[in-house]
Image (cartoon, rainbow, N blue to C red):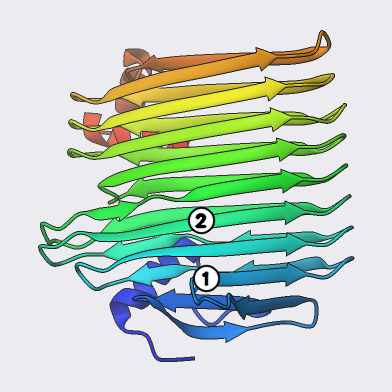
Amino acid sequence: MEEMNEIQKRLLEEVADLHEVPTGAFNIRANGKSIGRNSSANIEITSKEDGSGLDIRVKDGTRNESVHIPVVMTLSGLSEVVYNDFFIGEDCDVVIVAGCGIDNCGNANSQHDGIHRFFVGKNSHIKYVEKHYGSGDGSGKRILNPVTEVYLLEDSMAEMEMVQIKGVDNTERVTKAEVAAGASLLVRERLMTHGEQEAISKYTVTINGEGGSADVVSRSVARDNSFQRFDAVITGNTPCKGHTECDAIIMDNGRVLAVPALEANNVDAELFHEAAIGKIAGEQLIKLMSLGLTEEEAEEEIINGFLK
């Protein structure tokens, strides 16, 4: 594995909680190229023939293993699109850690667009963690536009943790899922914007199999002059259950637009949506300030608990 500089190491810790080379299967990408890769006995990582990304194949019956595929960028003006496909066999249980960190200290925009497709076999379970982070004191933007597609076969499950807490100037996060009989999708999004940042989240989930389910929940904080939009569409074509929820806190001049949508095409499709947008409750601030915290410290405690 090639040596990383201190900034790249810090970004790697932020997006993948990695302090050293991970065990098992991994591919670490820095400034447009792979700087380290390892396959395991059950998980094979190969480059696509056209060099545009990776194919990750997980053998049937693979359990208690992980795959790390983080990306870090420290060059101002770099822009890339990467396509990664995950082929998960049957009866598997694996953790997949992705994410991208951009440190931009220049005047040109830096952008990473990652397109991930998951084909999850019968009776398999995956946990997917995707964290985005930006830093650097340059005037160039840090732009991340992830696209995630999930195809769940019978009785499979995907848990998705989508996190963006700091430093990303513009993002459009697009997630699509198709859910077969007995399969389930669980999404937990945590998002915070500040300054002039904009964040768009779009979820489109189609439940095609009897007994399938989807639960998509977003918690977000919009600070300063930032703007967020949350779109969530759940379509139930069979007897199934679907739920979407958006809870947002607005501060300063922040703006949030929530657009939930449900489409029931079967009499036994049970679909629900919830949305709540508002400021931090005054009584919460007063209670924490009575314990000795300043107003600013109290706000931070409430936000940290809300986004946990």
Q: Which quarter of the picture shows residue 198?
A: top left
**Which residue is pictured at 81% across the width and 37% down the height?**
180
Q: Position of residue 143 (x, y in %)?
A: 29, 53
Amino acid type at image mark 1: Gly
Vertical arrangement, residue 44 with respect to residue 174, above or below:
below
Q: Say which residue label 1 marks.
A: 53
Q: Position of residue 90 (x, y in %)?
A: 88, 58
Look at mark 2 in the image and give the residue it sits on: 115
Kindly check if marks 1 and 2 are in contact, taking CB atoms under 8 A apart as contact. Answer: yes
For the view shown, which residue lies furthest in the bottom direction? 2
Going from N to C along the chain, the mark reached first, 1 or 2, is 1
Using the image as rendered, state which of residue 195 and residue 288 is in the foreground: 195
Q: Counting other residues with Cα less than 10 Å from the Cα at mark 2, is it few (<14), some (14-19), or many (20 or more)?
A: some
Q: Is residue 67 left or right of residue 301?
A: right
Residue 191 appears in view: yes
Distance between the alpha carbons at the discs numbered 1 and 2: 9 Å
